[in-house]
Amino acid sequence: MKLIITGGAGFIGSNFIYYELKQHPEDEFICLDKLTYAGNLSSLKDAMQQPNFKFVKGDIADRDFVYSLFEGEKPDVVVNFAAESHVDRSILEPELFLKTNVIGTGVLMDACRKYGIKRYHQVSTDEVYGDLPLDRPDLFFTETTPLHTSSPYSASKASADLLVLAYHRTYGLPVTISRCSNNYGPYHFPEKLIPLMIINALHDKALPVYGDGANVRDWLYVEDHCSAIDLIIRHGRDGEVYNVGGHNEKSNLVVVKIILKALGKSEDLITFVKDRPGHDRRYAIDQTKIHNELGWLPQTKFEDGIAKTIEWYLDNKDWWQEIISGEYQNYYKKMYGNKF
Ligand code: NAD
Ligand code: TDX
């Protein structure tokens, strides 16, 4: 089988490529990535050594480029990770989110229609469901929870999901969608909560916790997300949405304290800053469907996953030092300059 994996130079995409190379050495993998600020070729260094892996630089919203790639490669499966993925950036500059996340998804699906495909898989997010109240721990997102988005990012992801389902109904395109909770693990770009807090703590810099730090996320180790997508693309049913989550809800403050404790740093580094506009309070996934249909369950407990993640950041300083030495500093000033 030949798979095109878009956004494979990003956090989850690169982890997925390593997962697939290990689990399915008989398959062929092409990574298509624009290499935006979030894409990092060094994350794919070891994959580049494999004869069944190829990297192609390009934009999923560039129709001519995408069509010529599909014409040449004739993939069996497309897994679309490519996206603008950071909520805070979407609040500052929404337009790029529409172009990549909505138009880009449409172009990929048109290419699938034109050249034929066994499966198009859209990597979506639990953020399409909006948020849940903190005082109703009995509530969870199911696949039939209405879409109710809060940020330009989540609105763009929900739009893409609707487009994917419409292409299934109208054109019979064989699609699946996964909606996953917050991931953490190796190669996570340091603008996101967990890597940002690890790296700031290592530098004894303030840890900017938005609002009161009580917002809850359902954290899933990235490899568990990869195993879920692998099952869906190979055994999932056409036209179906599958929720993926860890039943591992933690407030941001609790997560930050766990990181500080593991690094032997003081909680005095915690600094409460101005809240994110429209900040979702709680995400929580009901993963009954993927468990019942495909037998999926997360394998990594948070205590083990966070320990492995911190160790990875300690062992791979070159990877993140390269990132934070560049444009990232301007981003940090722009994003956090007026929050403190
Ligand atoms: P990321 O920002 O780390 O990586 C995104 C990748 O997409 C980068 O390599 C970037 O260069 C590439 N890209 C961006 N625009 C592109 C374009 N126009 N054409 C080609 N490539 C482009 O993101 P991530 O955290 O790995 O997330 C991957 C996917 O999973 C996204 O679709 C995101 O919405 C979804 N998701 C993420 C999480 C999470 O916790 N990170 C949870 C659920 C779902
Ligand atoms: O500096 C920070 N301080 C802080 O308190 C940052 C960067 C975040 N936060 C809070 C905001 C959220 O409540 O931490 C929580 C997690 O924030 P992010 O890491 O930005 O993730 P989130 O907004 O939850 O979205 C993530 O999960 C769903 C991914 O970035 C999305 O791509 C995915 O769809």
Image (spheres, grey):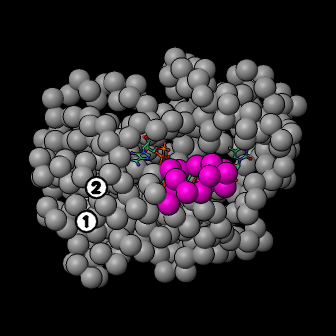
Magenta span has 94? yes
The location of residue 49, given as percent across then percent down, is: 23, 23
Quick check: can you spot residue 242?
Answer: no
How crowded pointer 1 is (Cα within 10 Å; few <14, some 14-19, many 20+) is rated as: some
- Identify which residue, 211 or 71, lies in the foreground: 71
Q: Give the foreground label among 1 and 2.
A: 2
Q: Residue furthest front?
A: 64
Which quadrant would residue 310 be assigned to in this image? top right
Residue under label 1, please give it: 110
Residue drawn at 26 percent across, 37 percent down = 56
Magenta span has 27? no
Residue under label 2, please give it: 63
Q: Give above or below for 322 relative to 156.
A: above
Amino acid carrying label 2: it is Arg
Marks 1 & 2, CB-CB < 8 Å contact: yes
The location of residue 269, given as percent across then percent down, is: 83, 31
Residue drawn at 52 percent across, 53 percent down = 96
Specify start and end residues of the magenta stretch as a single range: 84-98
Q: Give above or below for 182 relative to 19.
A: below
Residue drawn at 46 percent across, 38 percent down = 36
The location of residue 11, given as percent across then percent down, is: 46, 40
Tell me the element at label 1. Answer: helix
Quick check: can you spot residue 11?
Answer: yes
The number of numbered badges drawn on the structure is 2
Tell me the element at label 2. Answer: helix
- Identify which residue, 104 or 169, lies in the foreground: 104
Looking at the image, residue 220 sits to the left or right of residue 3; the answer is: right
The location of residue 208, given as percent across then percent down, is: 79, 39
Tell me the chief SS of the magenta region: helix
Residue drawn at 34 percent across, 24 percent down = 45
State the CA–CA distance, disc 1 to disc 2: 9 Å
